[in-house]
Image (cartoon, grey):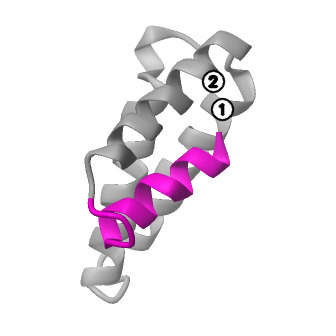
């Protein structure tokens, strides 16, 4: 993965933001397409990542999860990221 593509954490955040926007707008406009593009970029980054990059992303996700209330929406979203890495 190159720096130009962004970190796995940044791509995950972009994907999550796109999914939230698509859900909030009932997939209006091009929000669903944006979410699909963000998802594909994240998938490509995870596939191309080294073991060290995946470990760093996993640690970042577990730190994010640790700062949220267990069972909250933010906690579930952070957990979803942890399990995809």
Q: From where the camera sits, is residue 75 visible?
A: yes
Determine which of the numbered discs, if any, sits on residue 22 in the image: none
- Badge 1: residue crowd in 10 Å (few <14, some 14–19, many ≥20): many
Q: From where the camera sits, is residue 34 visible?
A: no
Q: Element type at marker 1? A: helix
Quadrant the C terminus occupies: top right
Question: Residue 18's image quarter?
Answer: bottom left
Quadrant the N terminus occupies: top right
Please tell me whether residue 79 is drawn above or below residue 71 in the rendered image: above
Q: Nearer the viewer, residue 12 or 52?
A: 52
Is residue 3 inside the magenta stretch? no
Image coords of residue 27 (percent x, y): 37, 82
User: In the rendered image, which residue does mark 2 sit on?
Assistant: 54
Residue 61 shown left or right of residue 58 in the figure: left
Magenta highlight: main SS: helix
User: In the rendered image, which residue does mark 1 sit on?
Assistant: 46
Mark earlier in primary sequence (1, 2) = 1
Is residue 78 inside the magenta stretch? yes
Point out the frontmost of discs 1 and 2: 2
Q: Nearer the viewer, residue 58 or 45?
A: 58
Residue 5 shown left or right of residue 22 in the figure: right
* Residue under the point 39% across and 67% down: 19
* Residue under the point 74% across and 30% down: 47
Total labels: the figure holds 2
Please tell me whether residue 43 is drawn above or below residue 75 in the rendered image: above
Q: Element type at marker 2? A: helix
Which contiguous range is marked in magenta?
A: 69-85
- Badge 2: residue crowd in 10 Å (few <14, some 14–19, many ≥20): some
Q: Assess whether mark 2 and mark 1 are in contact (beta carbons under 8 angstroms).
A: yes
Q: How far separated are the C-alphas under marks 1 and 2? A: 7 Å
* Residue under the point 44% across and 10% down: 3
């Amino acid at each position: 993965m190159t720096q130009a593509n962004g970190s796995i954490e940044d791509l995950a955040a972009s994907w999550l933001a796109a999914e939230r926007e698509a859900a909030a707008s009932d997939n209006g406009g091009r929000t669903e397409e944006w979410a699909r593009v963000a998802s594909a970029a994240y998938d490509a980054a995870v596939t191309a990542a080294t073991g060290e990059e995946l470990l760093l992303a996993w640690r970042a996700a577990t730190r994010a999860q640790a700062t949220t209330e267990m069972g909250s929406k933010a906690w579930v979203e952070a957990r979803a990221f942890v399990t995809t890495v």
